[in-house]
């Protein structure tokens, strides 16, 4: 069995890390400034994070250039794999981020509007570089719909079906984000995570809802995720990456030292 991964996530807006609740909706609390992305990445690197995800929520031409600079600076000083997402709409955007030092690129809305982008990226750079991030919301008993544009636009797509399709197109990993749980610290959506994990043949990273060490163990054990991604509990000092790994190991879950 492959070791489970612990992955901090940095939402970057205009060069600074921010954190919101339920995708930053104003009525849910808006955004909070957290700090410099490279300094935070170094902190998590020192704590033993397996990977780091940078997500550009500016998603403008200016924002992309700012993110290239962030990745370049982080890659110079960190020794863990880096994934970058947000505003990546072409093979050229992928190339720019990979050349800056990212190991993987993550696409979400662009994959929905242009599924061939997944195939083109996988053919050009290899599936191991292509991550498809899927934002889902529960819409009924046992039903989850995919949303695009930062969780604002319903697509009508079933979450499991889109995950399977993304892998068929060439995605080497799926990041599954629960809009309902995002930033709430109330726990992951175990059911949809398990369903997607059992249906695709690539690693699934669970995202949205981490509030306790037990939540992380649950989504890896019961949700059958391959990795856990979190933001708030790390940024605001609830736990360190080392705390999470020690707890997971105590539950019999294999993690990297």
Image: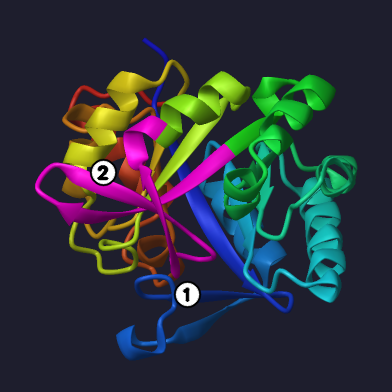
| Mark linked to residue 19 | 1
Mark 1 residue element: strand
Image position of 184 (left or right of 126): left
State left or right for residue 60 relative to residue 80: right
- Residues at marks 2 and 1 touching, judged by CB atoms closer than 8 Å: no
Image spot of residue 161 (x, y percent): 37, 31
For the question of whether residue 204 can be seen, the reply is no
The one nearer the camera, 103 or 191, is 191
The one of 68 and 156 positioned closer to us in this rendering = 156
Crowd rating for badge 2 (residues with CA inside 10 Å; few <14, some 14–19, many 20+): many
Q: Residue at x 36, y 75 (%)?
A: 21
How far from the left and from the top, in percent, is residue 257? 46, 28
Query: Quick one: quadrant of the N terminus?
Result: top left
Left or right of 23 in this view: 124 = right
Residue labelled with disc 2: 216
Residue 62: image quadrant is bottom right
| Magenta-colored segment: predominant secondary structure | strand
Question: Dot 2: what SS?
Answer: helix
Instruction: Give residue 202's position: percent from left, percent from top.
Output: 47, 20
Can you name the residue that lies furthest to the top here? 1
Q: Is residue 220 above or below residue 7?
A: above
Q: Is residue 146 visible?
A: yes
């Amino acid at each position: 069995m492959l070791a489970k991964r612990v992955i901090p996530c940095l939402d970057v807006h205009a060069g600074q890390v921010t954190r919101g609740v339920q995708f930053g909706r104003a009525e849910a609390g808006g955004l909070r400034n957290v700090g410099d992305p490279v300094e935070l990445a170094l902190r998590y690197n020192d704590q033993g994070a397996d990977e780091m995800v940078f997500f550009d929520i500016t998603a403008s031409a200016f924002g992309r250039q700012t993110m290239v600079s962030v990745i370049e600076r982080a890659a110079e000083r960190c020794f863990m794999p880096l994934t970058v997402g947000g505003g990546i709409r072409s093979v050229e955007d992928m190339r720019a981020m990979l050349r800056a030092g990212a190991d993987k690129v993550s696409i979400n809305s662009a994959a929905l509007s242009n599924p061939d982008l997944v195939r083109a990226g996988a053919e050009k750079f290899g599936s191991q570089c292509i991550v498809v991030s899927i934002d889902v919301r529960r819409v009924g008993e046992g039903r989850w719909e995919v949303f695009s544009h930062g969780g604002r636009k319903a697509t009508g797509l079933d979450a499991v079906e889109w995950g399977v399709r993304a892998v068929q197109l060439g995605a080497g990993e799926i990041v599954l984000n629960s809009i309902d749980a995002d930033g709430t610290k109330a726990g992951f959506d175990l059911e949809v995570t398990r369903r997607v994990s059992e249906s695709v043949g690539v690693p699934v990273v669970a995202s949205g809802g981490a509030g306790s060490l037990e939540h992380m163990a649950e989504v890896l054990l019961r949700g059958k995720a391959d990795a856990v991604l979190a933001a708030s509990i790390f940024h605001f000092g609830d736990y360190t990456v080392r705390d999470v790994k020690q707890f997971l190991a105590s539950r019999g879950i294999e993690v990297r030292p």
